[in-house]
Image: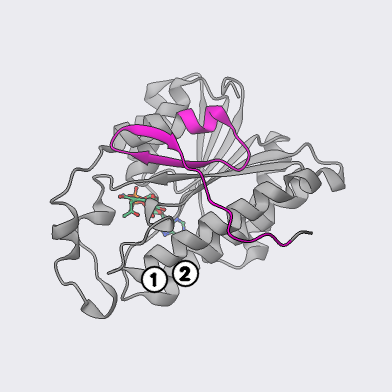
Amino acid sequence: MGLANKTIVFVAGLGCIGKDTCKALVKRNVKNLIILDRLDKPEIIDEIKKVNPKTNVTYQSYDVMAPVSESCKTLAKIFAKYKKVDVLVNGAGILDDHAIEKTIAINFTGLVNTTTAIMPFWDIRNGGPGGSLCNIGSVTGFNAIYQVPVYSASKAAVVSFTQSLAKLSKITGVKAYTVNPGITATSLVQSFNSWLDVEPCVAQKLLEHPTQTTEQCAESFAKAIERDENGALWKMDLGTLEPIKWDIYWDSHI
Ligand code: NAE
């Protein structure tokens, strides 16, 4: 998908990976970039706008933990204003295995709720035009960092949910894929709690191994959005973008 003239809604576009990905998107002449985030950082919005003044960059405060009815209201306003949204990026995430319920609420339930809220506008069964859903999973959704089993499982849930949506694309007309970063140098991984403190030095140990920069991750991210491949599982690690092949161990046959 050429991104010029597209309208993209980016949930969590002001985080470390989010900000650099937004910059990579506006460089590609996206028409409208609507950033939804719990953070309110006008200076980051200005930074993104400066990269390409031709892109219309806007911000709305958004908490993925709000009830789905709130997400529906936010999206209804966006569709009323812009008429068409081509891509929804779901990127909100936290890493703190002491905060079990919050991790699941933000990393998984919030993503499911925002997705559920956009479907009536996109679903071809309602006469909608379809759309593309880009969900941020993690390499930990493929193979866990077992010292943070709650975070890792929340990302595995994102991967699984998105794979089902990709299969439902025949019915809904909505494409779905995940972008799954490897360890990326952001504040998220600088220091975090392991589950039951099983590894007090988990962040330190993790960061002894090679990581990628947010700029590298952002470039892969924008390329994956351009590829727009239904059902893709993109690994974005150490500056590369690589499709993951998922083995099938069971089939529902329906
Ligand atoms: P970050 O903390 O800078 O960004 C987190 C973003 O989520 C921020 O924009 C924040 O405002 C938003 N957010 C959190 N709670 C929210 C809420 N209730 N409502 C709305 N927005 C909310 O960290 P980041 O590293 O840039 O992470 C961005 C995404 O990438 C997250 O989903 C994260 O899980 C994912 N990710 C990061 C890494 C990494 O190494 N940094 C990896 C994979 C996936 C590798 C690992 O899994 C450790």
Q: Name the residue: 33% across, 46% down.
A: 182
Between marks 1 and 2 in the image, the one whose residue lies nearer the viewer: 1
Does residue 156 sit above or below 238 in this rendering? Answer: below
Does residue 27 sit above or below 42 in this rendering? Answer: above
Residue 244 in percent (x, y) is at: 47, 42
Determine whether the residue tagged by mark 2 lies in a helix, strand or loop. helix
Disc 1 or 2, which lies upstream in sequence?
Answer: 2
Badge count? 2
Q: Name the residue: 19% across, 60% down.
A: 203
- Using the image, tell me which numbered label, if any, was put on residue 150: 1
Residues at circles 1 and 2 in contact by the CB criterion of under 8 Å: yes
User: Which residue occupies the extreme front position in the image?
Assistant: 249
- As measured in the structure, the alpha-carbon distance from the residue carrying label 1 to the one carrying label 2 is 8 Å
- The residue at which mark 2 appears reads as 104
Which of the two residues, 198 or 16, is positioned nearer the viewer here? 198
Determine whether the residue tagged by mark 1 lies in a helix, strand or loop. helix
Q: Is ligand 1 within 8 Å of the beta carbon of the residue shown at mark 1? A: no
User: Which residue occupies the extreme bottom position in the image?
Assistant: 196
The magenta segment is 223-252
Is residue 224 inside the magenta stretch? yes
Q: Quadrant of residue 87?
A: top right
Which of the two residues, 135 or 169, is positioned nearer the viewer here? 169
The image's colouring method is one colour
Horizontal arrangement in the rendering, residue 66 relative to residue 140 (left or right)? right
Residue 151 in percent (x, y) is at: 38, 65
Specify the amino acid type for callout 1. Val
Does residue 233 sit above or below 68 in this rendering? Answer: above
Horizontal arrangement in the rendering, residue 225 relative to residue 219 (left or right)? right
In the rendered image, the quadrant that contains the C terminus is bottom right
Specify the amino acid type for callout 2. Ile
